């Protein structure tokens, strides 16, 4: 099911056992060089590893050479309908070109683009979206969109293989999550090439996040997929949070801290939602990978998050700070967050050593429950 072939996009390895790569797309025109560069730099800072730019017109293609020269990320040119723009993008030094062989002008034009890509060492991305299927597959799509997507992609694969070109990845995206999942499952059984995952036109931040997490996450959990793009109607930087959260939730990649927080209940004496949101915001400043738990009380939350490196649990007037399964101390509620980050910074400065936890040590849940009971007894 996993891709056995590996390609390289601007030095980034894709497929063949390489880590899943996070990709996004600018929403500026390449001809707007400064705006495009600002967005690429923001994406890179947020964790993007490959960036794609739409190239609809000649001035956009002509601007690519400067963008490629200045970009901290490999640049992929997104080309439709015009093979001459693809050729200009390759000449400009892009790391890859996304084409749809079905709308680029016929087999001769495809051969011309493939020949240029071969000479330049440029990889391609091919494949189909639910909104851009070839006309002869429309009837099939009406009955089985997933099969139509797979058939369209396989037609493109055959065309490139006939040209003895194998340096490409494939996508079969649908706006329907079930169709997306079925299409990628089918395609992964038929080709050895890397697969680029996404739910196309997923929607705004909330709805698009849900659809992307279900669609992309399901496939990644099954070992399918080599690059991902979360398609949101939003600032592209917001796609990075979702993409990395999916990878971290599945244990596939690490980037920055992971926060655990309870859903709150009637035992919440501290306002756990506000507490968690404040901690989460401050954690954005840390590039290191570690786990922090934020709990609203000292009953069972800490036990559920007992594997966290650090955590806090709230109380009426005081809360508790714990580290690596042990309660460190109780702290006035208003100082909980600052004390947490003080401990965290000291640990990072000391080398982030995680102590081996003795088996006979009390769990964080037991220790905190006892501390809470003692506190109530003192009242």
Image: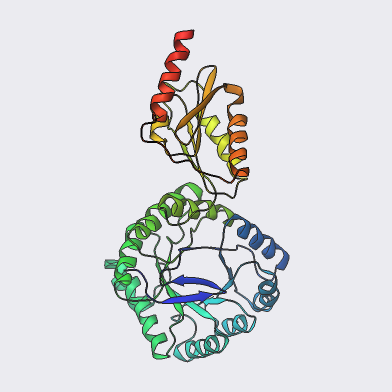
Most extreme residue toward the right is 34
The location of residue 46, given as percent across then percent down, is: 59, 55
Quadrant hosting residue 300: top left
The location of residue 144, given as percent across then percent down, is: 28, 67
Between residue 182 and residue 306, name the one nearer to us. Answer: 306
Query: Colour scheme of this structure image?
Result: rainbow
Quadrant hosting residue 53: bottom right
- Relative to 37, is 288 above or below? above
Left or right of residue 281, residue 3 in this image: left
Which image quadrant: the N terminus? Answer: bottom left
Between residue 94 and residue 35, name the one nearer to us. Answer: 94
Between residue 344 and residue 299, name the one nearer to us. Answer: 344
Q: Is residue 266 visible?
A: no
The location of residue 269, given as percent across then percent down, is: 48, 20
- Relative to 153, is 370 above or below? above
Q: Is residue 257 visible?
A: yes
At a point 61% along the width and 43% down the height, the residue shown is: 350
The location of residue 368, given as percent across then percent down, is: 44, 24
- Relative to 119, is 63 above or below? above
Most extreme residue toward the left is 143
**How many numbered discs sit on the rendered protein?**
0
- Relative to 184, is 79 above or below? below
Left or right of residue 41, residue 181 in this image: left
Quadrant hosting residue 73: bottom right
């Amino acid at each position: 099911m996993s891709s056995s072939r590996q390609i390289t996009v601007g030095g980034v390895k894709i497929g063949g056992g390489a880590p899943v790569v996070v990709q996004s797309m600018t929403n500026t025109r390449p001809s707007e060089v400064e705006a495009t560069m600002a967005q690429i730099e923001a994406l890179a800072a947020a964790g993007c590893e490959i960036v794609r730019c739409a190239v609809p017109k000649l001035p956009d293609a002509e601007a690519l050479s400067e963008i490629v020269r200045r970009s901290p990320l490999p640049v992929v040119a997104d080309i439709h309908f015009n093979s001459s723009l693809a050729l200009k993008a390759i000449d400009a030094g892009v790391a890859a070109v996304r084409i749809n062989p079905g709308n680029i002008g016929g087999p001769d034009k495809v051969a011309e683009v493939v020949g240029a890509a071969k000479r330049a060492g440029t990889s391609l991305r091919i494949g189909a979206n639910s909104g851009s299927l070839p006309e002869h597959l429309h009837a099939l799509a009406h009955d089985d969109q997933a099969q139509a997507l797979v058939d369209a992609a396989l037609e493109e694969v055959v065309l490139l293989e006939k040209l003895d070109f194998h340096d490409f990845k494939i996508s079969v995206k649908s706006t329907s999550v079930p169709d997306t999942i079925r299409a990628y499952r089918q395609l992964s059984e038929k080709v050895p090439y890397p697969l680029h995952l996404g739910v196309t036109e997923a929607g705004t931040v909330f709805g698009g996040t849900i659809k992307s997490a279900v669609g992309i996450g399901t496939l990644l959990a099954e070992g399918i997929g080599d690059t991902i793009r979360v398609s949101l109607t939003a600032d592209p930087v917001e796609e990075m949070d979702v993409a990395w959260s999916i990878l971290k939730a599945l244990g596939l990649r690490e980037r920055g801290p992971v926060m655990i927080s309870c859903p709150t209940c009637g035992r919440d004496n501290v306002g756990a939602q506000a507490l968690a949101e404040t901690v989460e915001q401050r954690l954005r400043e840390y590039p290191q990978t570690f786990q922090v738990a934020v709990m609203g009380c000292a009953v069972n939350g800490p036990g559920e998050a007992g594997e966290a490196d650090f955590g806090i649990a709230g109380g009426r007037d005081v809360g508790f700070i714990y580290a690596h399964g042990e309660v460190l101390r109780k702290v006035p509620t208003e100082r909980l967050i600052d004390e947490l980050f003080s401990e965290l910074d000291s640990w990072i400065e000391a080398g982030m050593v995680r102590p081996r936890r003795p088996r006979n040590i009390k769990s964080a849940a037991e220790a905190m429950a006892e501390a809470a009971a003692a506190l109530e007894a003192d009242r």
